[in-house]
Image (cartoon, rainbow, N blue to C red):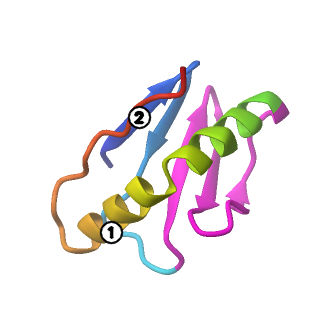
Amino acid sequence: MPTISRFFGIIIRMYVREHGVPHFHAIYGQDEAAIAIETLTTLEGKLPRRAHALVIEWALLHRAALLDNWHRAQRHEPAVDIEPLD
């Protein structure tokens, strides 16, 4: 489960063995959410409101890189780090 970005205490990961809708996982403390890349809707889990807003802001900036990493994961290729939110 490679970590592809970290910012403001939030960890972004993409799991290689997952299928279905392209998505990533955002972890903040004990909270975790799976978020669809194309729609940015929460598929499961939850984050505190502020952390969720930061994750969505970051994902809007990096949607193409997230999709590229999803495709890389499906081919069992290593993920590429994505710039954190400043």
* Residue situated in front as seen by the camera: 18 or 51: 51
In the picture provided, is 40 more to the left or to the right than 68? right
Could you classify mark 2 by the number of other residues whose Cα lies within 10 Å: few (under 14), some (14-19), or many (20 or more)? some
- Say how many tags the image has: 2
Q: Residue at the location (27% across, 65% down)?
A: 73
Please name the amino acid that badge 2 sits on.
Answer: Ser
**Can you say whether 67 is above or below 82 in the image?**
below
Residue 26 location, x and y as percent?
Answer: 57, 43
Say which mark, if any, is on residue 17: 1
> What residue do we see at 39% from left, 32% from top?
83
Query: Over which residues does the magenta segment extend?
Result: 21-49
In the foreground, 47 or 67: 67
Q: Can you tell which quarter of the image residue 56 is in?
A: top right
Q: Which residue lies furthest to the bottom in this view?
A: 20
Please state the horizontal and vertical placement of residue 66, each as a whole percent of the image: 43, 56
Q: Report helix, strand or loop for mark 1.
A: loop
Q: Which of marks 1 and 2 is nearer the N terminus?
A: 2
Residue that numbered label 2 is attached to: 5
Is residue 22 a member of the stretch shown in magenta?
Answer: yes
The quadrant where residue 19 appears: bottom left
Looking at the image, which is closer to me, 19 or 75?
A: 75
Image quadrant where residue 4 sits: top left
Q: Is residue 12 magenta?
A: no
Q: Is residue 71 above or below residue 82?
A: below
